[in-house]
Image (tube, grey):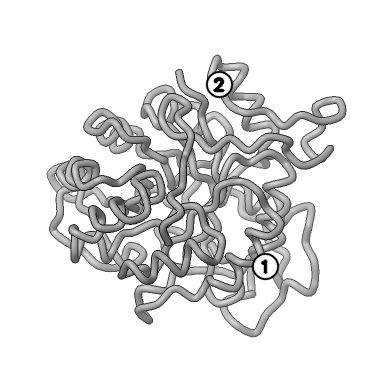
Amino acid sequence: MSTIRIIPRLDIKGPNLVKGVHLEGLRVLGKPERFARFYYENGCDELIYMDVVASLYGRNSLLDIVERTSQEIFIPLTVGGGIRTIEDIRKILQAGADKVSLNTAAIQQPSLISEAANRFGSSTIVVSIEAKKQPGGVYEAYTDNGRIRTGVNVFEWAAQVQALGAGEILLTAIDQEGTGQGFDIELTRRVAESVSIPVIACGGAGKTEDVADVIEQGKADAVSLASLLHYTYIRSHYTEDDYSSEGNVEFLRGRRSFTKVQDASLARIKEHLVENGISCRILEGKNGDEQSGTPQSCHRRLRHGQPVQRQTRL
């Protein structure tokens, strides 16, 4: 088995990290830079920044956040949301991202995938597939952060994006996303078996066992986590100045807990994977303490340990 990557996903609206259920009902959790720094120092393998309202406004507004993050965090960073053109991709990469995630624009203009892969390299292009199960068991791809139906069959689309040159697929199960009820194993396995490029499973983790299940049963190459990590962070790192007048901050103000997910640190998740015979990068530090320091090696991996080699023709 190849080395599995654990990738925190940070959904961002304006200046804030937000989280919802089924990609809806977004609540403010804090400042994304704080979460990102903490996850980096505690052994995550990559990070995903997603501008969740970008498609509504036709632009990605994360350039400043990406630039600040890339100066302090030295692991691969994927950025998505509202990226529609080659020039958009260029700006995101110049700001410090290692990869870009395409969804709405890719479905509307599939040739963008091949153009971007040829220009910047396949390993730089991630296609995000937001999947929802329809009556009859058909999985349909959605766009605009899970708001718009496309009529596109998820499995046919996955095969097409690989043929067009995408380097990875970020697969989000809308029905499971934010629920803490576990991943859609069937969806992940069927997509993973239909392509040879890495599949990143996203949506549904509520406990450490869910992560192992989507790897072993769903055949995911990497796992993207949000609620499972974010709510654990908030329980021990709550700060008053995370408040903002922008967005729904009632969850933070009420100091409420999210009972659908268990406490799960990056260290504990990876320990559980190793205990189950799943290879992953473990943070080296004093006594194995997850907070003992910054990772000394940055593994930029694709399937079977192949390194990401970002093109420099920006």
Looking at the picture, tell me which residue is in the foreground, 276 or 97: 97
Q: Is residue 175 visible?
A: no
SS at badge 1: loop
- With respect to residue 120, does 183 lie above or below? above
SS at badge 2: loop
Looking at the picture, tell me which residue is in the foreground, 72 or 51: 72
Looking at the image, residue 41 sits to the left or right of residue 174; the answer is right
The numbered mark, 1 or 2, whose residue comes first in the sequence reads 1
Q: Position of residue 31 (x, y in %)?
A: 67, 67
Q: Residue furthest right?
A: 286
Looking at the image, residue 252 sits to the left or right of residue 158; the answer is right
Q: In front of the other: label 1 or label 2?
A: 2
- Disc assigned to residue 210: none
Q: CA separation, marks 1 and 2?
A: 31 Å
**Residue at the disc numbered 1:** 31
**Residue at the disc numbered 2:** 279
Q: Position of residue 134 (x, y in %)?
A: 19, 50
Q: Report the quarter where the N terminus lies.
A: top left
Dividing the picture into quadrants, the one containing residue 160 is top left
Residue sitting at x 55%, y 47%: 76
Q: Position of residue 169 (x, y in %)?
A: 34, 44
The amino acid type found where label 2 is placed reads Ser
The amino acid type found where label 1 is placed reads Lys
Q: Position of residue 256 (x, y in %)?
A: 68, 62
Dividing the picture into quadrants, the one containing residue 220 is top left
Residue sitting at x 32%, y 51%: 127
- With respect to residue 71, does 285 lie above or below? above
